[in-house]
Image (cartoon, helix red, strand yellow):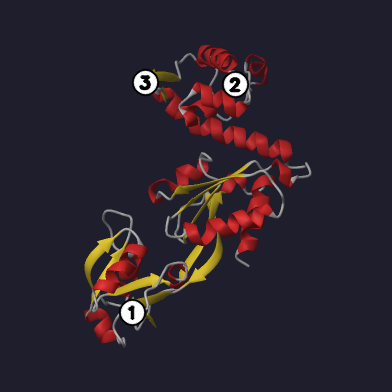
Amino acid sequence: MQQIHNENSIDLRSFHRIDINLYPLFVAVFEQKSISRAAQILSITQSAASHALQRLRQHLQDDLFVRTGSKMQPTPFAEQIYSEIKHALITIQNISIQNQQFEPTLVQNLKIAVHDEIEPMILPKLVAHFQRFNLDIQFVSIKLDRKNIVSDLATQQVDFVIDLEQPLGDKIQFELLDQDEFVVCTQQQQITEKNYLASPHIGVSSRRTGVLVEDLYLSRNHLSRQIFLRCQHYSTALQILQKHPSAMLTIPRNVLNHLHIDKSLKIFEVPVKLQKINMGMYWYKDLQENKRHQFLRSEINKIFT
């Protein structure tokens, strides 16, 4: 009788043929696109890494990585199995440390993805806070890519994403860190709903296209405004305001507090109803009970309380 294959079953007898120590190397090469850099991360020689990769190729019966120029590019099969291997290693890691006493000295790096307008508000506080522990931590802040938030967290390209609140699915956890509000910056001496909606506005976004969040909020109230210029940074917009007496800029108050404001500019409350801005921390759900992650989440939260 033909045996029916069950994907959820486990053949314990096969594990003597599986060297689990080869799989962290697979993840490191996949993420670094380099055998030498993967070897450095794993604290082994490049020769040992090359031999280990060859063993894994033989075991999985696939090349896994092909050299293209100076980079090791994954094969289609490697692309297919990467996420599952990474998740399996995370699960094993979490199980192995869950009953251990966590020591902050075990934290070697902290990687966050954050919008470049928010980075000056967060990173100095982050570094200053962790300096109290006298830890040798490497801090890495990378530019936020909203299209890849879920995959970046799932594959641990970053530990946390700090961004505006938005639904990202069941696998992503969110914790509110701070709440902000929009204000209006302009040379005009007074502001009403009428002249706010009629005046030329500067919009700020790093995206090439798409509706600005302020305009999304306005549209919910069946209101609209005129965007005469769209730029990438609030600091640029503030400089343009100095040259354009009738223009207006709607900007988060906390962002404005970290920028230089010319004496010619006035700050007003927004004369129409706009929602509060909820900013928080995202992380991958599978790391919820991870001791390192719990420690980092707790300390990041303290910065905002």
In this rendering, does residue 101 appear at all? yes
The percent position of residue 277, horizontal first and vertical second, equals 45, 69
Of discs 2 and 1, which sits in the foreground? 1
Q: Residue 220 bears which disc, if any?
A: none
Q: Is residue 251 above or below residue 31?
A: below
The percent position of residue 99, horizontal first and vertical second, equals 77, 42
The percent position of residue 40, horizontal first and vertical second, equals 58, 26
Q: Is residue 184 above or below residue 178?
A: below
Question: SS at mark 2?
Answer: helix
Q: Residue at x 51, y 62 (%)?
A: 121
The disc labelled 3 sits on which kind of residue?
A: Thr
Q: Residue at x 52, y 22 (%)?
A: 36
Question: Residue 267's quadrant in the figure?
Answer: bottom left
Of discs 1 and 3, which sits in the foreground? 1
> Is residue 191 shown left or right of residue 259?
left
Task: Categorize mark 3 by other alpha carbons within 10 Å: few (<14), some (14-19), many (20+).
Answer: few
The disc labelled 1 sits on which kind of residue?
A: Ser
Which circle's residue, 1 or 3, is located before the other in the chain?
3
Q: Residue at x 63, y 57 (%)?
A: 128
CB within 8 Å, label 2 to label 1: no
- Distance between mark 2 and mark 1 Cα atoms: 63 Å
Q: Nearer the viewer, residue 95 or 66?
A: 66
Which circle's residue, 2 or 3, is located before the other in the chain?
2
What residue sits right under mark 3 in the picture? 68
Question: Residue 196's quadrant in the figure?
Answer: bottom left
The disc labelled 2 sits on which kind of residue?
A: Leu
What residue sits right under mark 1 in the picture? 264
What residue sits right under mark 2 in the picture? 22
Q: Nearer the viewer, residue 220 or 279?
A: 279
- Distance between mark 2 and mark 3 Cα atoms: 22 Å
The percent position of residue 39, horizontal first and vertical second, equals 57, 23
